[in-house]
Amino acid sequence: MARRLDVTGADGVRLAAWDYTKLTGEDDTGTAVGAGSAHAVGDVRAAGDGRAAGDPKADPRSVPRPPGPRTASVPTPTPQAPQAPVQAPASTPGVLLLHGLMGHAAHWAPAARRLTGGHRVVALDQRGHGHSQKPPAGPFTREAYVADAAAAVEQLGLGPVTLVGHSMGALTAWQLAAERPDLVRALVICDMRASALGAASQRAWQDWFRDWPAPFPSLDAVRRWFGEDDPWVERPNPARAAFFAEVMTEHPDGWRPVFDPAQMLTSRETWVHDAHWESLAQVRCPTLVVRGLDGELGRAEAQEMVRVLPHGAYAEIPDAGHLLHYEHPEAWSEAVEPFLNGVLTP
């Protein structure tokens, strides 16, 4: 189970974070042994997690996750009363997981659960995503996302932290590492480019959002569209289908995303037009660049990113696409954990 922690981000935006730290008395899935309800950590509001049937290794959706929007695979749980606070040791190294655009903290669950002990693992719902606030007027700038991540590190006592980011979350992570080296111990960049994507990319995304057949009549229709019917899908992709089903919520007229597509475009607008090599070169901490073999970050650019980084390393996950940590959590953990253990061991 994951424990919810509340964070106040930039401009007072309310953010939800989820602590995956395995505590004394929990089994390998994070379930409290011999207890009927969840522990609370600090000012956490504890909640149980719904589970799908099946082996977690065979079906990543069956791994415990933070409570998400109402879906068939991850039902919304009933909050349970907090127990006596149980704190991870103060010396436990902190790891903050930052999801990508349109994602949410629960997408890290399959990978987070495969990280062994010795880390305090927290995932953040970034502004406009998941259970965090979605202010109508924003801002959804790079500065706001970076300030939110800094607030999470400071308010949750994670620093110096190891930042692990996917896609847009990876850019947030390395910009924070460049701007606040005092807060960051190490960095993992998952499938995020440093090159500018350009105006054509933004226009393509605008057209893509307009083409969504939303509201969807059912979650099966959501999975069918994002896993098979979407013109951007080259071949059936069950992981992509499951990824988007988890960020849908039911309305009277059907299923819609928990995020506002216009806010996603605004968020994206602030980083697709510029290259980010300069901020990458300013990252002084040990950094691992991870790509999926079929992801959006090409091998040549990934290796150039490693070269630009003062302390860069490289890892590649075969058979993985852009959703590498979600689609192949076991392979992801095998690629990342040796790096984490190396930088987090005194």
Image (cartoon, rainbow, N blue to C red):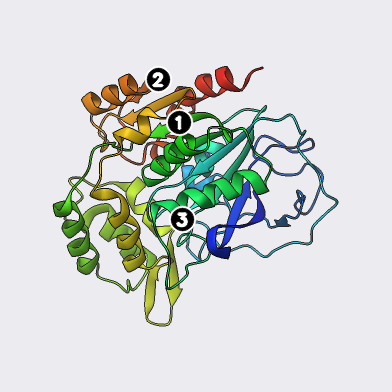
Residue 40 placement (x, y as % from top left): 76, 51
Drawn side of residue 105 relative to residue 44, left or right = left
Q: Tell me which label, 1 or 3, sits earlier in the chain.
A: 3
Q: Which mark is residue 310?
A: 2
Q: How far apart in space, not on screen, are marks 3 and 2 (Cα)?
A: 26 Å
Q: Tell me which label, 3 or 2, sits earlier in the chain.
A: 3
Q: How far apart in space, not on screen, are marks 1 and 2 (Cα)?
A: 14 Å
Disc number lying in front (1 or 2)? 2
Could you say which is closer to the camera, residue 181 or residue 319? 181
Could you say which is closer to the camera, residue 303 or residue 244? 303
Callout 3 touching callout 2 (CB < 8 Å): no
Secondary structure beneath label 2? loop
Q: Tell me which label, 1 or 2, sits earlier in the chain.
A: 1
**Residue 289 at least partly seen:** yes
**Residue 53 at least partly seen:** no
10 Å neighbourhood of mark 2: few (<14), some, or many (≥20)? some
Drawn side of residue 260 relative to residue 235, left or right = right
Name the amino acid type tagged 1: Val
Please name the residue shown 45% across and 35% down the image: 178
Q: How many labels, in total?
A: 3
95 is higher (above) or lower (below) than 106: above
189 is higher (above) or lower (below) than 102: above
10 Å neighbourhood of mark 3: few (<14), some, or many (≥20)? many
Name the amino acid type tagged 2: Pro
As drawn, the residue found furthest toward the left would be: 200
Residue under circle 1? 188
Secondary structure beneath label 3? helix
Could you say which is closer to the camera, residue 35 or residue 292? 292
Drawn side of residue 96 relative to residue 243, left or right = right
Position of the C terminus, as image quadrant, is: top right
Residue under circle 3? 144
Residue 308 placement (x, y as % from top left): 32, 23
